[in-house]
Amino acid sequence: MITFKEFLLIFMAAALFVGCQSAAVSKPGSSQGVIPRREMDALKSAAKAYSGRDVSDEDIYRLANQLQNNSEAQEATSTVTNALIQRPVVYYCPVDGKRFAPSVKECPEHHVQLKLLE
């Protein structure tokens, strides 16, 4: 089984190269959660190439569900997507230099306004 971080990297890479297709794969036992067949195949191929092991459709659906319902995962996806399509926006604490995502505007430790890293 692949880890969530591995899945996130694979998912982002596959999303760059795959367009939507009419043929799709439904989540086993459900009429919801349809992933286009070409995208599913690309995700599974990338996962196998990255991890060296086979990944089932169920593994992909489980990890996609985690991505959809986990705010940390959503922010990570947003950060990766932004990094791939534009210059990343990073803020830092002027006190200790610690870096933060664009959604954080104040250092949680020092309570000072973050500055944009240029």
Image: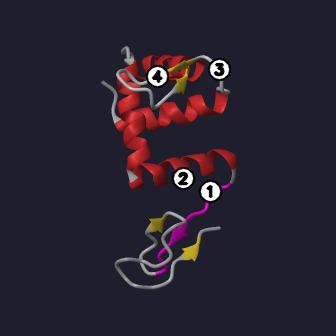
- Lower position in the chain sequence, tag 3 or tag 1: 3
Q: Which residue is mark 2?
A: 79
Query: In the image, which is nearer the foreground, mark 3 or mark 1?
Result: 3
Which amino acid does the dot numbered 2 rest on?
Thr
Secondary structure at numbered mark 4 = loop
At label 3, the amino acid type is: Ser
Up the image or down, 82 lies above or below 25; here it is: below
The spot of residue 57 in percent (x, y) is 40, 20
Answer with left or right where residue 101 lies relative to residue 1: right
Graded by Cα atoms within 10 Å as few (under 14), some (14 to 19) or many (20 or more), the crowding at tag 2 reads: some
Q: Circle 1 sits on which residue? A: 88
Q: Secondary structure at mark 1?
A: loop
Magenta segment, which residues?
87-94
Q: Is residue 44 visible?
A: yes
Q: Mark number for residue 22?
A: 3
Question: What is the C-alpha distance between the residues marked 3 and 1?
Answer: 33 Å
Question: In the rendered structure, which amino acid carries the disc numbered 4?
Answer: Ser
> Closer to us: mark 2 or mark 1?
2
- Marks 3,1: beta carbons within 8 A: no
Q: Is residue 85 left or right of residue 96?
A: right
Q: Residue placed at 51% from the left, 67% from the top? A: 103
